[in-house]
C-alpha cells in the first residue's frame, strides 16, 4: 500500500492538510434563526447516523458563531461522516467540514492524556500576612485552641436557653390542654346549620 509523503515544510499553514482525527470542524452553519440547544440537537441527530457521537460543541459567541465541533468515538467514522456530509444542506446552508486541528478534551480524557489548562493568573497572586491571618482566624463561636487543649469548653452565653413554665411539674406532661369555652360555642353554632338539598335530585 502506498503511503503519502509529508507536505513540504515551506507551505503556508492554510494549505497544509490536517491529519484525520475523531473531531470534525463544521462551518457555514446558521447562527441567527436557531437556538444553541436546537443547533446542537440537530447536529447530533445528523452526525450520529454515522456512528457514536461523544460531544457536540456549538457556541454562539462572536468568534465561534456559525461553527461547531463534532467529536466521534472513532476516526474512521469521523472520516466517513465528513466525506458524506461535506457540502450537504443543513437548515438551508451548505456545511463545510474539515478535520479539527487539535484533539478534543473528551478524547484526551478517555485515553488518559488529558492535562488541565495551565493555572490562571489568580493562582500566582501572593497572599499577604494580613490576608493569611484572616483566612486562618477561628470561626466565631467555635472553641479556641486553648480551651480544646485544656479540655474545657467555652461557657454558654447567659439567657440563651428558656425553660417552659409547665416543664417543671411531671403531672402536666403528656396531658391535653382544655379548650376555651368561647371557641367551642362558635364552632357548634356553625355546625348546626342545616344543609340545603340539591335541586338536581328531583
Image: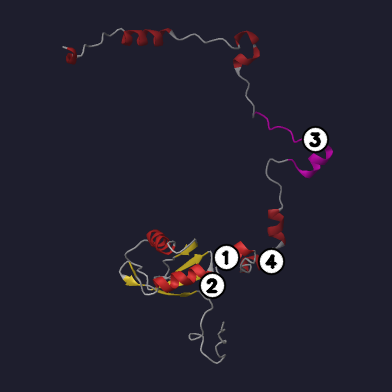
Tell me which secondary structure the magenta stretch mostly adopts: loop
Residue 103 against residue 45 in the figure, above or below: below
Of mark 2 and mark 1, the one earlier in the sequence is 2
Q: Position of residue 187 (x, y in %)?
A: 36, 11
Viewer-nearest of discs 4 and 2: 2
Q: Is residue 17 above or below residue 116?
A: below
The numbered disc on residue 107 is 1
> In the rendered image, which residue does mark 4 sit on?
126
The answer to whether marks 2 and 1 mark residues whose Cβ atoms lie closer than 8 Å is yes
Residue 62 seen in the current view: no
Residue at mark 2 to residue at mark 1: CA–CA distance: 10 Å
Q: Earlier in the sequence, mark 4 or mark 2?
A: 2
- In the picture, measured across the screen, residue 23 lies left or right of residue 49, that is right
- The residue shown at (72%, 55%) is 133
Circle 1 Cα neighbour tier, 10 Å, few/some/many (<14 / 14–19 / ≥20): many
- What stretch of residues is rendered in magenta? 143-159
What is the CA distance from the residue labelled 1 to the residue labelled 4? 35 Å
* Residue under numbered circle 3: 152
| Residue occupied by mark 2 | 21
Quadrant containing the N terminus in the rendered view: bottom right
Specify which label sits upstream in the sequence, 4 or 3.
Answer: 4
Residue 192, image quadrant: top left
CA–CA distance in space, label 3 to label 2: 66 Å
Amino acid at each position: 500500500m502506498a503511503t503519502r509523503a509529508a507536505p513540504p515544510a515551506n507551505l503556508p499553514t492554510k494549505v497544509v492538510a490536517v491529519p484525520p482525527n475523531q473531531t470534525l470542524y463544521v462551518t457555514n452553519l446558521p447562527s441567527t434563526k436557531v437556538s444553541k440547544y436546537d443547533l446542537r440537537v440537530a447536529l447530533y441527530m445528523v452526525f450520529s447516523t454515522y456512528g457514536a457521537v461523544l460531544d457536540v460543541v456549538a457556541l454562539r459567541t462572536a468568534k465561534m458563531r456559525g461553527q461547531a465541533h463534532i467529536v466521534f468515538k472513532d476516526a474512521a467514522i469521523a472520516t466517513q461522516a465528513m466525506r458524506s456530509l461535506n457540502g450537504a444542506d443543513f437548515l438551508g446552508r451548505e456545511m463545510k467540514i474539515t478535520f479539527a486541528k487539535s484533539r478534543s478534551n473528551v478524547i484526551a480524557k478517555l485515553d488518559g492524556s488529558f492535562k488541565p489548562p495551565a493555572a490562571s493568573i489568580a493562582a500566582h497572586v501572593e497572599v499577604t500576612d494580613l490576608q493569611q491571618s484572616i483566612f486562618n482566624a477561628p470561626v466565631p463561636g467555635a472553641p479556641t485552641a486553648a480551651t480544646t487543649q485544656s479540655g474545657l469548653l467555652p461557657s454558654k452565653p447567659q439567657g440563651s436557653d428558656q425553660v417552659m413554665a409547665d416543664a417543671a411539674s411531671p403531672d402536666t406532661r403528656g396531658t391535653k390542654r382544655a379548650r376555651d369555652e368561647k371557641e367551642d360555642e362558635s364552632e357548634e353554632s356553625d355546625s348546626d346549620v342545616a344543609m340545603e338539598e340539591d335541586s338536581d335530585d328531583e
